[in-house]
Image (tube, grey):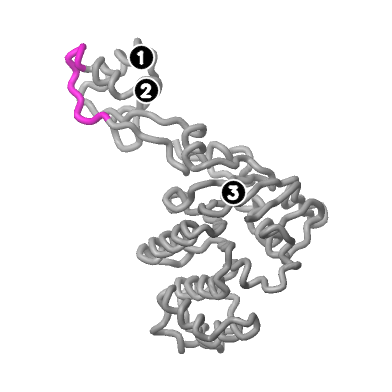
């Protein structure tokens, strides 16, 4: 478990993290989201004792990170996948970490197999692709079989198979009862991976909710209707209290009426319907709605 209480970090006149409080609980994947510059990486660095809070506290398993006598056995982290001595092989990199933390050599072989690097264990790290480096970073994080796993942008550089692998791996770790805390800018992937979401903007907490609750309370859900009688159906739906708009890939977005009522109204008026599908708001839409006022740089859409 990770507990942050009124966590604040200043760099001179810059307020990077502003009175931030949250819990990351075991048994689920918690996603950590925010625009660039929102304070996510700074917060993760404070969790790991790499940055000292200006005020407030953050603990891992009930203690500040620096008070753990065997930290690699308590929390494994992937912050910078390239932070490896380029001249060392993957095996020797992990072996050095294992020997310095009282971990048996057998565990090095186990984690190399777990992350799919057994066949390249003797290759120097400088020859690794970004995706291979991400796998090696996760191997190092899991070396001590920790109760807490923290990853900053773990899917960067991975191909689709690798992305699915990291998702499956992190969800399996959470299912074992571990605390899993993951940041990412890939909303589609986070929607598949995370059970719970913490959203920050300009260093402040914007949301701390289950994925289902965030989607339900955020951007609107709608029904997608495809019909050759769009103008007439829109008029009928407006009279029934709905609002309609053109969908990006064709059809009508209908807000304010359930699908069964839309279908009944179309049938009553003899209007053909080729598709009638409920659409849940995406995580991307909910995220953009939440963080609209927390973005430093915004590009206006072309009209």
Q: Position of residue 230 (x, y in %)?
A: 26, 22
Residue furthest toward the top?
239
Where 74 falls versus 204 (above or below)?
A: below
- Mark closer to the chain start, 2 or 1: 1
Mark 2 vs mark 3, foreground winner is 3
**Residue 24: mark:** none
Q: Label 1's element?
A: helix
**Residue 238: mark:** 1
Q: Residues within 10 Å of mark 3 (few under 14, many from 20)?
A: many
The boundaries of the magenta stretch are: 267-276
Q: Is residue 269 magenta?
A: yes
**Residue at label 3?**
34
* Residue at 54% across, 36% down: 289
Dominant SS type (magenta): loop
* Residue at 58% across, 68% down: 146
**Residue at label 2?**
244
* Residue at 35% across, 34% down: 279
- Mark closer to the chain start, 2 or 3: 3
Q: Label 3's element?
A: loop
Disc 1 and disc 3 in contact, CB within 8 angstroms: no
| Alpha carbon distance from label 2 to label 1 | 7 Å
Q: Label 2's element?
A: strand
- Mark closer to the chain start, 1 or 3: 3
Q: Residues within 10 Å of mark 1 (few under 14, many from 20)?
A: few
Mark 1 vs mark 3, foreground winner is 3
């Amino acid at each position: 478990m990770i507990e942050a209480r009124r966590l604040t970090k200043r760099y001179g006149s810059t307020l990077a993290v502003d009175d931030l409080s949250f819990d990351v609980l075991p048994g689920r994947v918690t996603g950590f989201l925010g625009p660039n510059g929102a304070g996510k990486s700074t917060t993760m660095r404070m969790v790991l004792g790499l940055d000292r809070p200006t005020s407030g506290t953050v603990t891992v398993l009930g203690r500040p990170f620096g008070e753990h006598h065997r930290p690699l056995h308590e929390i494994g982290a992937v912050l910078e996948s390239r932070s490896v001595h380029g001249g060392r092989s993957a095996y020797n990199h992990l072996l050095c970490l294992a020997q310095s933390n009282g971990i048996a050599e057998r565990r090095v072989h186990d984690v190399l197999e777990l992350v799919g690097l057994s066949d390249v264990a003797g290759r120097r790290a400088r020859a690794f692709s970004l995706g291979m480096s991400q796998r090696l970073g996760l191997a190092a994080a899991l070396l001590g079989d920790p109760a807490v796993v923290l990853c900053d942008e773990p899917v960067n550089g991975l191909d689709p198979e690798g992305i699915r692998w990291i998702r499956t791996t992190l969800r399996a770790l959470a299912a074992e009862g571990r605390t899993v805390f993951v940041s990412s800018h890939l909303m589609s992937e986070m929607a598949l991976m995370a059970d719970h979401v913490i959203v920050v903007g300009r260093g402040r907490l914007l949301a701390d909710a289950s994925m289902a609750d965030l989607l339900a309370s955020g951007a609107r859900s709608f029904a997608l209707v495809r019909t050759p009688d769009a103008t007439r159906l829109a008029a009928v739906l407006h009279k029934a209290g709905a609002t309609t708009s053109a969908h990006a890939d064709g059809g009508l977005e209908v807000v304010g009426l359930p699908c069964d009522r839309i279908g009944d109204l179309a049938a009553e008026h003899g209007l053909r319907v080729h598709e009638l599908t409920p659409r849940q708001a995406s995580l991307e839409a909910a995220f953009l709605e939440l963080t609209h006022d927390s973005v430093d740089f915004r590009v206006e859409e072309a009209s």
